[in-house]
């Protein structure tokens, strides 16, 4: 940090003051990083968003969705080499935690810079025990903590996503801009600003929304910079430093042979430009493909949910408008630019695009806290003057001591109030994160690949499901022989199954497929659905044989009991694999309610479904075939060990859930 920059942080440029900044920023980084790691997603936790894609793309050094994210991909690859516990996905998740914590530390420095200038100039000489820098530090800490535990940012800091790194660049560019000298001498600072601006462009293109505010601030406060000797040379160097990081986009053609996970990237100039410019995403600005309707109340609630109350931010805005208008221009224009864009950007996950405005509001909130703290001190100082006028010199020291106690009490009250707010936000968001960041998706992927599938079988499903399987195939070498086929559209999926069956492949689906029951026979195997060109006969063996009729048309030949993968806490689910024998056409679309009863006859868990994972309605069952059906009964975490009895009930949902048959199975010991 240059001498000028450190002076503009509100304290003299000496080793002691710099050490204070370093220690407090480092403490916030460490505390935030510990928080994010302690709540970090343990592995893959999503299927239908970008997190899973990044966990695989960074490992294989492939190409992510537009804009390609070369910087994030390379950084993610470096994180996969960290000798930390957990799998590849966990280590990529750490990248988000690291840059999330770094953003919190930078936000503290940003708030100190925003709040300390005018307060330093207007320091009350009667309160040397409470310098303005202390209120700035207090505001910086509280504002940074409010942002650190805000639900959207906290959640993004625990999964493999691009938004904490983008927030880091936003905070970095704002901080570098604010620490530039105001008379044009800060050539080195301008060069760093240009470099980081270019580097940020290699990550997330919404950083462009920050550039107008930075340009306006520099134009208003660097008026005579163009008159200095060597300005043209410096300008050229700035442009070169700003453009040089963009060479990272050469990563795309260099790794074009790997391609993107969805196979859409074309390693041509047209394909490269389409990827970098993300032209296809313009549809979310010019139209509303998902039909999202959001009123102003939605956006108000969004900010309210992040910070519990928006009043500190309003106080910060008042202070900047009163004392630091140049800072208000920078942060205010940036805030309005981001908000304006987000109002027109009609994506489903709009909350993550509000992270830069959240950061700015947190900065204003920190300034507001610093302002309130300083005002409390100044009010106490005014009371001291009255006391000195009314009391003798003998009692002046006692009066000063009382005023100091009053000041500290007011500051303590501010700390208590915001500590309460921070605790409330923390307690509200922690259970939400715990429910999201589980092993469920991880275990689902393992479950599919641990089934006894024939060599070189094909699994057909949507992109997210196939990415999950490919993640385990590539990072853990699990069943690399299996072919994973992406077909998001149902019509395409039917055509793919038809083609693969004609080639003699063993075909498995990940989900129900309209049109398949009328063409083929279906059976469940674990979480998958086997597609047979012809009805199948009874299996060669099963754990329990019954041959017991349940309805006039359906009998239970037998069943197996197993336990699917369970990595997280709690007992593994009880998997019932049922073998139904079809004696005659079923004239109703029946459903099965699979339940697990405790010794008192109470249902502790239940699953209601159309047979074969909702994929094979009974109206499509062929006489003489055997249908394999699977139900996973998940016990409550607090379920006591003991004997539990599985109960199967067939019912007709079209007849007010009228029961048509039931069967009790042998009790199962659960430990």
Image (cartoon, grey):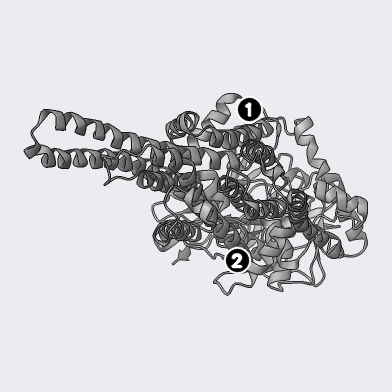
The foreground one among 359 and 500 is 359
| Distance Cα–Cα, label 1 vs label 2 | 36 Å
Left or right placement of residue 389 versus residue 520 in this view: left
Q: Position of residue 333 (x, y in %)?
A: 62, 33
Given residues 523 and 565, the one toward you in this image is 565
Task: Name the spot of residue 103 as percent of width and height, x first.
Answer: 54, 52
Residue contact between numbered discs 1 and 2, judged by CB atoms under 8 Å: no
Specify the label residue 158 is tagged with. none
Quadrant housing the C terminus: bottom left
Q: Pinpoint residue 254: horizontal percent, then vertical percent.
A: 85, 65
Where is the N terminus found, in terms of image quarters? Answer: bottom right
Name the residue tied to disc 1: 294
For the residue pair 231 and 623, the one nearer the viewer reads as 231
Q: Residue at x 56, y 45 (%)?
A: 178
Residue topped by disc 2: 91
Residue 530 visible in the picture? no
- Residue 222: give x, y in percent of width and height: 64, 41
């Amino acid at each position: 940090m240059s001498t000028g920059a450190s002076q503009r942080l509100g304290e003299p440029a000496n080793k002691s003051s710099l050490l204070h900044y370093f220690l407090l920023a480092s403490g916030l980084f460490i505390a935030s990083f510990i928080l994010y790691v302690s709540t970090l997603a343990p592995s893959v936790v999503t299927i239908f968003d970008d997190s899973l894609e990044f966990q695989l793309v960074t490992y294989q050094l492939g190409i992510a969705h537009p804009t390609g994210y070369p910087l994030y991909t390379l950084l993610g690859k470096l994180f996969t080499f960290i000798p930390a516990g957990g799998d590849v996905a966990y280590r990529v998740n750490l990248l988000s935690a690291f840059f999330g914590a770094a953003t919190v530390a930078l936000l503290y420095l940003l708030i100190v810079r925003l709040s300390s200038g005018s307060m330093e100039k207007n320091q009350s000489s009667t309160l040397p025990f409470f310098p303005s820098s202390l209120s700035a530090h207090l505001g910086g800490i509280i504002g940074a903590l409010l942002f650190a535990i805000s639900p959207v940012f906290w959640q993004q800091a625990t999964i493999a996503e691009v938004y904490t790194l983008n927030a880091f660049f936003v905070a970095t560019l704002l901080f570098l801009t604010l620490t530039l000298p105001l008379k044009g001498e800060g050539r080195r600072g301008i060069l760093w600003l240009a470099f980081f601006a270019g580097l940020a462009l290699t990550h997330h293109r919404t950083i462009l929304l920050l550039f107008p505010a930075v340009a306006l601030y520099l134009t208003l406060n660097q008026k005579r910079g163009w008159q200095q000797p060597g300005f043209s040379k410096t300008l050229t160097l700035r442009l070169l430093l700003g453009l040089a990081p963009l060479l990272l986009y050469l990563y795309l053609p260099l790794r074009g042979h790997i391609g993107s996970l969805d196979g859409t990237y074309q390693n041509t100039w047209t394909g490269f430009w389409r990827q970098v410019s993300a032209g296809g995403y313009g549809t979310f600005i010019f139209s509303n493909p998902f039909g999202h309707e959001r009123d102003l109340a939605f956006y108000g609630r969004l900010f309210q949910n992040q910070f519990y109350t928006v009043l500190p931010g309003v106080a910060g805005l008042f202070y900047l408008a009163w004392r630091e208008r140049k800072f208000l221009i920078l942060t205010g224009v940036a805030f309005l630019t981001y908000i304006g864009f987000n109002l027109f950007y009609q994506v489903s996950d709009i909350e993550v695009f509000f992270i830069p405005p959240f950061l700015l509001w947190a900065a204003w909130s920190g300034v507001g806290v610093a302002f309130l703290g300083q005002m409390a001190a100044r009010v106490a100082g005014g009371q001291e003057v009255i006391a000195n006028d009314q009391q003798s010199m003998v009692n002046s020291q006692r009066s000063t001591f009382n005023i100091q106690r009053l000041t500290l009490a007011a500051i303590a009250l501010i700390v208590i109030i915001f500590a309460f707010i921070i605790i409330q936000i923390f307690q509200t968001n922690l259970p939400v994160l715990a429910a999201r960041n589980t092993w469920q998706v991880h275990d689902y992927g393992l479950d599919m690949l641990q089934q006894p599938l024939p060599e070189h079988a094909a699994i057909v499903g949507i992109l997210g499901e196939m990415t999950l399987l490919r993640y385990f195939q590539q990072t853990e070498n699990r069943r690399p022989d299996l072919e994973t086929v992406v077909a998001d559209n149902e019509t395409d999926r039917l055509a793919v199954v038809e083609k693969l069956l004609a080639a003699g492949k063993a075909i498995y689906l990940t989900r129900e497929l309209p049109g398949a029951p009328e063409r083929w026979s279906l059976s469940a195997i674990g979480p998958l659905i086997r597609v047979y060109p012809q009805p199948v006969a009874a299996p060669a063996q099963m754990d329990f044989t019954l041959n017991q009729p349940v309805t006039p048309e359906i009998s239970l030949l037998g069943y197996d009991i197993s336990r699917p993968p369970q990595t997280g806490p709690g007992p593994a689910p009880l998997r019932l694999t049922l073998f139904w024998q079809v004696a005659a056409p079923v004239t109703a679309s029946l459903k099965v309610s699979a339940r697990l009863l405790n010794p008192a006859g109470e249902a502790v868990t239940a699953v209601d479904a159309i047979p074969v994972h909702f994929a094979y309605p009974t109206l499509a069952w062929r006489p003489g075939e055997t249908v394999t059906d699977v139900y996973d009964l998940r016990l409550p975490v607090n379920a006591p060990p003991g004997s539990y009895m599985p109960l199967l009930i067939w019912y007709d949902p079209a007849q007010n859930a009228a029961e048509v048959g039931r069967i009790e199975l042998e009790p199962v010991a659960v430990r």
